[in-house]
Structures are given as structure tokens and as C-alpha cells.
Image (cartoon, grey):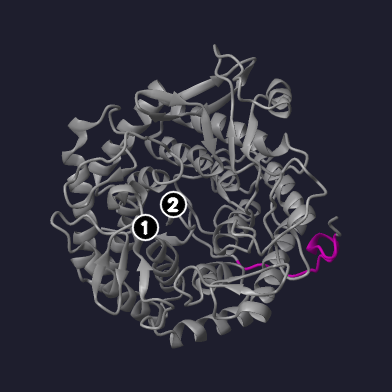
Amino acid sequence: MRTYRYSPLTTLQNQSASCLLTTGRLFPSTPPAYYGGDRINAVRLAFRRAFRGYQAHAWGHDEVRPVTGGWKGQRNNWGATIFDALDTLIIMNLTEEFKAAREHVKNVRFTDTDDYVVQVFETTIRYLGGLISAYDLTKDKVFIDKAVQLADILLPAFDTPFGIPLHSVDIKAGKGVDSHYRHKSSSLAEIGSLQLEFRKLSEITGNNIYDKKAQKVIDILKQKKSELALPGLYPIHIDPYSLKFTTTHVTWGGHGDSFYEYLLKHYLLTNGERSDVLDMWKTAVNTTKERLISGVKDFSDLTFVTQWKDNKAIYKMEHLACFMGGNILLGGKALKDNSLIELGLNLTESCYRTCYSTATGLGPEIFAWIPTNGKESLFMSRVQRKMSRLVGFYPVNYGYYLRPEVIESLFYAYRITGNAKYQDWGWEIFKSIERYCSTEIAYSGINDVSDPMGAWDDTAERQVIVVFFFYAETLKYLYLLFSDVNVISLDEYVLNTEAHPFKIISH
């Protein structure tokens, strides 16, 4: 049985949070209906306690085990939590913790890793993204010097016949390493989510090699659009040696998600310079509206997004895909397209309802539903049938692993509409995280969102450790949701897929 030992909600202090003030233009700049006060401080205290738990039990390693107090090193073991948390520490004005983090980053040797093989995508979005963002916010040369060192280590992954990067790099041998996926294929999200970091690095350093390598991937994908069964929507695996797609699976969830996210954000980061990627994003969204958007049987107010495989819809959605609401909202605002804003808000609310409809108020890792004209599956359990009839969806994977995507979309919904209900919904999720995920050391994911009395187990292989994105994304999006809209203004910054803010490039 779980016991609730500690919660920042019960120990609020009058601590002021920092504000990085910028001038808003496209996005609302009037004072929001509610911001500041106890909510901001509660999130800041939660982050500080979790980070100090990491400092005490896992400093220098990638992740802390929040129940047993051990550590895990699944992302190169250079201290992924530290790199991922850099800009959050800056935004929250946690100067003591930031000093320690900067010192660690300064002394890290990227040639020291457990097996010398590092994943290109994960290393780029977390380590490289964190370094670039920290530099953008501080102009401290330590961060950009480290970013260049790391990017140069990753470049051999692009040494393939067509320039499609391999999954990993052997940093000792200085060469790319094939993936473990079927046919040794490359993942769409992994090859299509390097462009913000590499473009920004080229802009800062004046060295175009990084942008050139990443942009070649997009150029190749553009050339393959005639092969797509669904216009603008790409299968999630491609052979880097032959350029053949190795699956028909299309999804806005895992292995597809951040590719579509970056098409829009690449356009925004370059201040409208890259209209070609915006066109790719618009085509993908239009096809999604026509072919993948799904209603729910007996719940006309719910909107979900199917997957697609072998010419058939799959009525299943990952928590990961709930970033879509925010991404479509961001595009709708930039394009002044009210129909996209409406769709983004519908998706955001539907994803939020997968949270508040559970016994814990936390959303499941994967959920499914019965489409408007569909029937219950023979494979549904009695519990799934009951939940589907009551709330319109049912969990397939019951775990909540501290993921940020629903909160991310609430953040964009609030920033774009100014409606305080999105802050209130985010606050409800934060309270549930406090109640069901808080441990003596930090925070743990849970294995069953339908069980308020469920136990933690951070020795399991599933992600019930304090994953680094909890520091980089989940708590940052909550903090920004409750902050003044000029803190990391969306007119001045684009957030990468790990919520690392990059200053928009001026021309």
C-alpha cells in the first residue's frame, strides 16, 4: 500500500520565481485570468525536491531510482538528467542547483561512456538540445563549446549512401551503427527530429555543416512523397541504405511524433524562411483531418486520432500522441487558421479527459476507443467494456510514466486562448502527480492509473524511474502554464521536443 510521505503542496513557501521577460506579439500579452502565487511555487518546489533527490542518489548518472535510491544509466551515462534540466533550472531561477549542473557539464568527457555506442536521436534532443538552450538563455560559452564537441561526435552517423543517419554512433570507432529495428531501418522520428538542434547550432557557430546534414534528410523525404499512401504521412521506418519504407505503419505516436512536430517548428524557428517544411506539415495535418481523425461511439464531444497500417485504421492512441493538440494549436495560431485552433482544442480536451476519467486522474500510456459507427471488440475485457461505455475510451497500457504530452498541449491551449480552465486542468494533473507519484526521494511512474492504491516498483524494466523528461518537460510545462505569458514567450522562442527553448532566428 502506498503512503504519502511528502508533498510540496503542504509546504508552500513564499519563494519568488524568475521571469525571463520578452515582448509578446502574435500570442496574447495581456495578464492572464490567473497566474502566479501558490501554483508556480508548488511546481518549483516539486522540481527542486526531485532534483535534489537526484543529486543525493544519482548525481552524474542519467536517472535516479525514486524508491530504492539507486541510479540507472541508459542514455550514455553522462548525466542526462543534468543536461535535460539545464534550462529548467535557469527558468526557475534555481541558482545553486544550476551552478552544480554547469560544473558537471563543464567537466564531462563525451568519450567516456559505458559501451561507446550512443543513440543519435536521444543524444541530440536531450543533451545537444539542453546545451543549445542553456547557451541561448545565458550566452555562457561553456555550453556552446560542449554542444560543438557533441555534435561533431554524432556526425559520422550521416555517413550513409544517401545521408540518412544511422541509429547510433560508435564514438570510439568514429562510425555509425545500425539500429535494432527490423531490417536495420531508421525511425522517421529519429531522422526527422534533428533539424532544430542542428539548424540552431549552425546559426550560433556559423558552421553550416550541421544544418546541411540534417536538412538533407528532409530533402530526401520530400522526394518520396509520391510513394505515400496517405499524402504527407510517412511510414515510420525507412531503410537508410535503399531508401525503401520497411513498414506501412503511420502514426503521430512513437516513431512518428516529433517528425511532424519539427516540420512546423522548423518553419517557426527560421522565422518563416523554410516554407517547404510548413507545406509538408500542412499536407500531413490536412490528410490527418480527412483520414485519421476519429469520433467516438456515443461520445460526440470526443476527438481522437487513429494510427494506420496495411490500409486499415487502428483505433488506438498513445499518450505520446497527445502532443498533437498543442502542435496543431501552434500551427493554427501562426497561420491564423481558426479551424486548426478548434481541432487542436478538441484534441487537447479529449486527451485531458483520458486523465481525469481515471481513478488517479492520470492518463494511461495507451488507450483505445470504439469509433462512431463501430462495435465492441470480442477481445475487450469486462472492465474495458464498462469504462468504454462510461467515458468513451479504455486503457490498453494502464501505466503512467510521468509523461508531459497532455500538459504540453494544455500549455499551448492556455497561451493561445488565455482561457484559465487549461491552467485549472493542469493543476488537477499536478495534484494527481503529487498524490500518486511522489516518493521520499523524488517521483515515480505508476503501473496502473485505475488503481489509487497501487505500489511503485523502480526495479522493473518499465519506466518507473524518474525519467529525465520529467525534469525537462513535465514540470517545465506546468511551471510555464502557471507563469506570465511573457516567460519564454512563444513569439521569441520555439521549444524542441524535449521542451528546450531555442531563440527564434532573426534575419
- The correct choice, above or below, for 384 with respect to 76 in the image is above
The structure residue drawn at horizontal position 79% and vertical position 64%, both measured from the top left corner, is: 8
Residue 31: give its label: none
The structure residue drawn at horizontal position 80% and vertical position 68%, both measured from the top left corner, is: 13
Residue 260's x, y, as percent? 37, 42
Q: Which callout, 1 or 2, points at the residue further toward the start of the chain?
A: 2
Identity of the amino acid at label 1? Ile
Q: Which residues are magenta?
A: 4-18
Identity of the amino acid at label 2? Asp
Per the image, the residue denoted by label 2 is: 491
| Predominant secondary structure, magenta span | loop
Q: CB under 8 Å between callouts 1 and 2?
A: yes
What secondary structure is found at the residue carrying circle 1?
Answer: loop
Residue 428 falls left or right of residue 324: right
Residue 215 falls left or right of residue 316: left
Per the image, the residue denoted by label 1 is: 504
Q: Residue furthest top?
A: 373
Q: Residue 66 or 246: which is nearer the viewer?
A: 246
Q: Quadrant of residue 176?
A: bottom left
Q: Is residue 208 visible?
A: no
Q: Quadrant of residue 252?
A: top left
Q: Residues within 10 Å of mark 2 (few under 14, many from 20)?
A: some
Please identify the quadrant where the C terminus is shown. Answer: bottom left
The answer to if 102 sits in the magenta stretch is no
Q: Residue furthest left?
A: 161
